[in-house]
């Protein structure tokens, strides 16, 4: 249906959170064009299907099942459910404000020069955060925006400020064949972050422009289990892997960016200096940066291994064909 919009999200074993999130969708102001909610169950083994069924008579909800693990696999499957001119992406732990869709639709209708629309993501703390949370940059860790974020066009260099919890893309882009890359983003265990950023950067290189819509607001649930230093430091590794995956074109040796041979020892020295001087904040900040660099090195090694394997397979096929 022309002009309507589709909200698309993937979920896996988050029945408890979905049961809290979906009532917020029941309270949305209805876009004048109409809307639908498409949810992809990515192999859940909990009560997800029952939770979705319980909202079938309260929401324009359509669901589909994708057994292959990976958020991007699920989103690509869910694109088959998209109707209308605008596809709005979010996550299963995100609570939309009542006028969220109205604001996104208004931006899309009044700003035809733009194809990508990012909205504001603010935190919804499950418990009060610890004092040391101020030691870290909250954006990369929790995918939330600072209050000072600006309204307006987003430069190509700033596209990573668009988070998958709140981004809309004109649907004709997907009808033309655009898809998410399954090799990046959540898929169980460790992974390179940057699911939506990868797609948005590819679209930007094709000439599509992005606009930040500050009044389109959602709240991202920050669970208590994510407020631990150990979890956040593991997050740094995933963030580093994603950064290299998104921008691998740097000077390297054996696939490893040259700057890592300088920066990793530097951060190790800073960690040591902060540790012996009992400066807890400086030590944690250095550990975060060290893990970020470790993640970049890890992803560089993984990509180099994939390239070598691909070359070996090509060589083997050539031998067989001879």
Image (tube, rainbow, N blue to C red):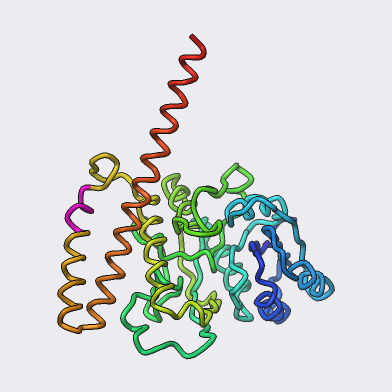
Q: Residue 281's image quarter?
A: bottom left
Q: Position of residue 207 (x, y in %)?
A: 44, 47
**Which residue is painted at 65% across and 50% down in the image?**
68
Q: Position of residue 318 (x, y in %)?
A: 46, 16
Magenta span includes 131:
no
Residue 81 appears left or right of 236: right
Which range of residues does the magenta coloring cover? 258-263
Nearest the eye: 120 or 215: 120
**Which residue is painted at 43% across and 33% down in the image?**
309
Predominant SS along the magenta part = helix
Position above or below: 179 against 264: above
Residue 299 appears left or right of 168: left
Q: Is residue 114 visible?
A: no
Q: Is residue 270 visible?
A: yes
Position above or below: 275 against 269: below
Magenta span includes 262:
yes
Q: Residue 136's image quarter?
A: bottom left
């Amino acid at each position: 249906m022309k002009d309507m919009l589709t909200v698309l999200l993937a979920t896996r074993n988050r029945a408890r959170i979905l049961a809290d999130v979906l009532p917020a969708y029941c309270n949305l102001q209805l876009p004048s064009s109409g809307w639908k909610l498409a949810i992809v169950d990515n192999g859940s083994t909990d009560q997800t299907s029952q939770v979705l069924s319980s909202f079938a008579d309260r929401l324009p909800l359509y669901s589909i099942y994708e057994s292959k693990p990976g958020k991007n696999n699920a989103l690509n499957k869910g694109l088959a459910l998209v109707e209308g001119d605008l596809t709005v992406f979010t996550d299963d732990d995100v609570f939309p404000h009542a006028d969220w869709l109205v604001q996104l639709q208004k931006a899309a209708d009044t700003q035809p020069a733009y194809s990508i629309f990012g909205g504001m993501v603010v935190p919804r703390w499950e418990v009060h955060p610890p004092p040391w949370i101020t030691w870290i940059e909250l954006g990369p860790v929790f995918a939330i925006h600072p209050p000072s974020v600006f309204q307006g066009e987003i430069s190509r260099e700033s596209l990573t400020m668009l988070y998958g919890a709140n981004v809309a893309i004109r649907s004709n882009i997907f009808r033309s064949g655009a898809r998410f890359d399954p090799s990046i983003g959540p898929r169980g265990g460790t992974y390179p972050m940057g699911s939506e950023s990868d797609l948005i950067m590819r679209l930007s290189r094709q000439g599509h422009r992005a606009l930040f819509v500050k009044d389109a607001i959602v709240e991202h649930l920050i669970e208590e289990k994510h407020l631990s230093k150990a979890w956040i430091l593991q997050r740094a590794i995933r963030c580093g892997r994603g950064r290299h995956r998104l921008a691998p074109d740097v000077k390297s040796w054996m696939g490893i960016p040259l700057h890592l041979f300088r920066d990793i020892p530097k951060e190790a020295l800073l960690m040591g200096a902060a540790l012996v001087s009992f400066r807890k904040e400086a030590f944690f900040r250095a550990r975060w940066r060290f893990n970020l660099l470790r993640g970049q090195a890890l992803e560089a090694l993984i990509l180099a291994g994939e390239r070598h394997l691909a070359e070996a397979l090509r060589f083997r096929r050539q031998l067989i064909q001879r």
